[in-house]
Amino acid sequence: MRLIKHSLAFSIATLLSRVLGYVRDAVIAYHFGVSHVTDAFFVAFRLPNTLRRLLGEGGFNAAFVPIFAKRCKEGTERSFLNSAFTYYTLFNLSVTLLGMVFTEWIIRLIAPGITGKDYFDLAVFMARFLFSYLLFVGLSAFFMAVLNTRGVFFVPAFAQAVFNSVVALCVTVGAEKFGHMALVAGVVLGGLAQLLFHIPSAYACGLIPKPALERDEDLRLLLRRLVPALVGFGVAQLSFFIDTFMASFLAIGAISYLYYANRIFQLPLGALSVGMANSLLSALSVGGDPRGNITLAFRFVTLLALPASGGLVVLSQQIIALLYGRGSFSQEDVLIAGKVLAVYSLGLTFFSLQKVLASVYFAKGDTRTPVLSSLFSVISEGLLAFVFAFILKLGVVGLALGTASSSLVGFFFLFYSWKERHIDGRAYGASALKGLVATWVMCMLLLLTEPSPLGLLYAIPTAVMLYWFLLLLLREPLAYLPLNLFKSLVKKLANP
């Protein structure tokens, strides 16, 4: 249950962060809609934002946490903390400066289709400033990994909400007067605020590092694990670059449609899989029951991912209309972005399980297998996206379909490469079947009622309650978890 508590803390904070992220995106959509400005901004922000995922939620965490957890148990974590912080900061600063120097060539590489378009110079100008965000988010990633090891999950996950709030505020206040510069200022100031948000918790835990050029004995081990981990997560993040690369050859707005839809798709993916993956990584790194923890993680993620996927497919148009359908965001934009969101959501369950299973490999120090899995996923995505988008003429929807299809490749590669399958197949299969039945009934109800965009405010809670009630009827053990947590809370309040 400790695993689920940590996962819930991370997931709740991430959910709040994602909600504020959509407030941020809604503000951008209201002021700039789907236009050459948004295409330029989303291309410019693609690399630093992708590296945020790479450094903040994946590669560094996977390599650092097991080593730091071991040193904490030995009581020798201070020298490793100082040494890792110093060299990680120098690395991050170097990447940031290189990005600023070679901005134009990077934009040509990731979005060659916009080279001859009138907003290419704007994309280069914005990207040169936005690279400074990398320095702040890299340091935030370091504190996130350190705090996760000490069992602090809420603060690091909520730090992204601080960033989203600052960006939304800057765009709201400055868009009319300063135009695209409000977007640039929001990202830079938001990154700084995100970093500073970690400091009080790190100080309270006694985890404020000091610069030290002395090389700790485990620094070499960190580097050996970090390089393949970064490569692995980097390969996984190539998915975003493939979409941007191909979308740059489509009509103006394709890049923006992918971004707006993917942001909504990342809500359940980030809140469910990343939270559970980080919690499982920490639990397996410090010991415990691998079979019980892994089975529990698979069941928990599946039971939450299935209804989220079904709901996003059925309600995609209404969700896009509710979140973005105002101001400069037209009805046609709602229609296209809704189709993209529905297709993205088809791969949600397998993407979620893939992240959870990858953490099992990382906990054992195996970074090679997740790298290969990501590589096969990216190759399949590129091939399928090209076929769907350009040969079958599905356009931007075809790019999303290629991404969703690649989730199957990545998951099954990890699963069939898993030699020590610490999982109770019967227990997991029973939970997955119950989740599928409950999801089907829930989706049928949503299709029959056809709620309006505003109607989602009551339709979604009703669907969630129905799904939970159906799981209770089907006697799914994890469905009783909310009731047990509520009883525990009542006891604590009654006997403080």
Image: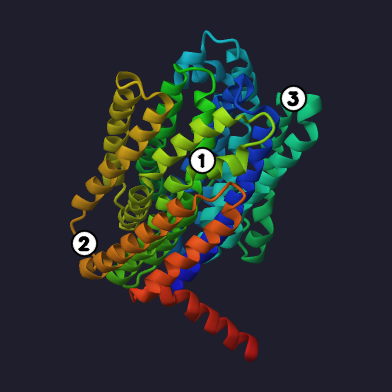
Up/down of 405 relative to 412, above or below: above
Disc number lying in front (1 or 2): 1
Name of the residue lying farthest toward the bottom: 495
The residue at the point 23 percent across, 69 percent down is 424
Q: For mark 2, what is the residue? A: 421
Q: Looking at the picture, which amino acid does disc 2 mark?
A: Arg
Q: Quadrant of the C terminus?
A: bottom right
Residue at 54% x, 65% y is 9
Residue corresponding to mark 3: 179
Left or right of 382 on screen, residue 109: right
Callout 1: SS = helix
Q: Hey, which quadrant is residue 459 in on the image?
A: bottom right
The kind of secondary structure element at disc 3 is loop
Look at the numbered discs 1 and 3 and tell me whether their residues touch, using CB distance below 8 Å. no
Q: Which picture quadrant has residue 4?
A: bottom left
Residue to which mark 1 is pinned: 317
- Residue 296 lies, with reference to residue 163, above or below; the image says below
